[in-house]
Amino acid sequence: MMVGTSRCDVRVRVVIDLLELLQSAQKPNGMSAAQLFAMKVRLTTAEAIAIVLCAWVIAPARAAEPVCPPRPLPLLLSMAHWQSNAFYFRVTGTGSYVLQLSTNLRDWNSFTTNEAAETQPIIRIPAIHQNAFIRAALDEPIRPLFSFALRASLGIVSNSGWLLVDSYDSSDTNYSGPGGWYDFRKTKDGGDVALGFANDGTHYLGNAHIKGRVFTGESSMVMLGPNGSIGSTAWQAAGNTGIEPGWVTNTLRPSFMPAPVTVPFVGGVVPSAGVVGGVTYNYVLTNADYELNVISGSQKMLVTGNARLHVKGAIFISVGGYIDILPNASLQLFCAGDAKLAVANRGATTNFQFYGLASNTNLSTYGTLVGVIYAPNAVFTFGRSTDGSDLGGACIVRQFIGLHANIHFDESLKRFCGP
């Protein structure tokens, strides 16, 4: 019997050969469905048929917009059987995709989608040729999580009248300092901000200095104080204030804000205490998935490996407490309650990732924070009125309250596709 998987392009992830799949589907007379299928086809074509199911991603990018590498589609095929003049099976999977059929690996015809009426739709493949190939094609490309310095559905509140937004690139030594850290002498003007829909129609940004573009909802506008500026580095370096022509647009769609994430793992162990370098830590995290009910008080946490932590309640780190992430370690922190953070990330921007779950509505921190904040339902209070605070990375929040705050967007995040 001809198998034919070698004809799949090497870039294609072959999920399963249909003929192998059918070996376990027994018919009452003892003949497997694969044998029955081949014999049935031989009656009409006198040749064996190979059908290959492939998870292929067809995701054309928009101009100058990076797209994340395709994720495999975890298709689950079941109840395979031959009936009349066609082959039937059930398919389940995540994502929005169409199923397409080809006989030559060049011309493809869509014949169904996973958004059919049934939860597990029955898929029919007609016997149209001795070689048939099936692929799943994504309807939409997967895009990076962080394409803006700040996304805030309810906008910005800057109580001190000071907010600086600019950008750097931790992957490019021309636009970053040693170790990929922010260097004010090597900044860029990619600090784009998405502010959504203002309650009264106007986003009041005071004397903010934004080296980047500002996007709002179609019914909103931006108002600056007398010393505020929005525009390119060159335009602002020339001493201009106000808004550089073309650098504020009201083209955001209502769907510009993403939904909160869910915890991508089930369970987890409670981290143990330990002494490292003469310092006693309440929690030491290595390469594992962890869970805690709460984090409270002046507790100290050290992250030495690539860890994921689910906090089921609130995080309230008081004076003397902190989360310390070593240079080659990373922490993905999923928080269900409100959070007050104190984090020292000694490594790359993505080595600290905070994900506020749907019930996380308030978040605060101050000082220097290197990392990403993904908390679309939370009001994020960053900084304090007595001194400046710097965020190197990006954030997605419901509202941003900046107290003498600086946001330095790491443009390398445009290639970061999330957990």
Image (spheres, helix red, strand yellow):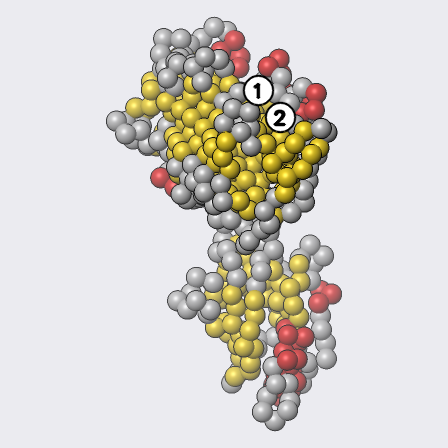
Q: Is residue 364 visible?
A: yes
SS for dot 2: loop
**Label 2 neighbour load within 10 Å: few <14, some 14-19, many 20+:** many
Q: Nearer the viewer, residue 131 or 58?
A: 58
Give the residue at the far left of this rendering. 200
Find residue 82 and report its image quarter.
bottom right
| Residue plotted at (69% across, 34% down) | 275
Q: Do the CB atoms of the residues marked 2 and 1 lie less than 8 Å apart? A: yes
Which amino acid does the dot numbered 1 rest on? Answer: Lys
Count of numbered tags: 2
Determine the residue positioned at 53% across, 12% down. Answer: 234
> Along the horizontal axis of the image, is 224 left or right of 30?
left
Left or right: where 298 falls relative to 326: left
The location of residue 318, given as percent across then percent down, is 49, 27
Which residue was labeled with disc 2?
169
Residue 98 position, x and y percent, is: 50, 60
Lower sequence index among marks 2 and 1: 2
Residue 181 vertical position relative to residue 361 in the rendered view, above or below: above
Q: Is residue 232 visible?
A: no
* Secondary structure of residue under mark 1: loop
Q: In the depicted view, which residue is nearer to us: 391 or 322? A: 322
The answer for how far apart the CA atoms under marks 2 and 1 are is: 8 Å
- Residue type at mark 2 is Asp
* Residue receiving disc 1: 188
At a point 64% along the width and 64% down the height, the residue shown is 15
Tell me which residue sits at (62%, 30%) in the image: 324
Q: Position of residue 38 (x, y in %)?
A: 65, 83
Q: Quadrant of the N terminus?
A: bottom right
Residue farthest to the bottom, as pictured: 29
Q: Nearer the viewer, residue 309 or 200?
A: 309
**Which image quadrant: the C terminus?**
top right
Position in image of residue 149 (x %, y %): 50, 28
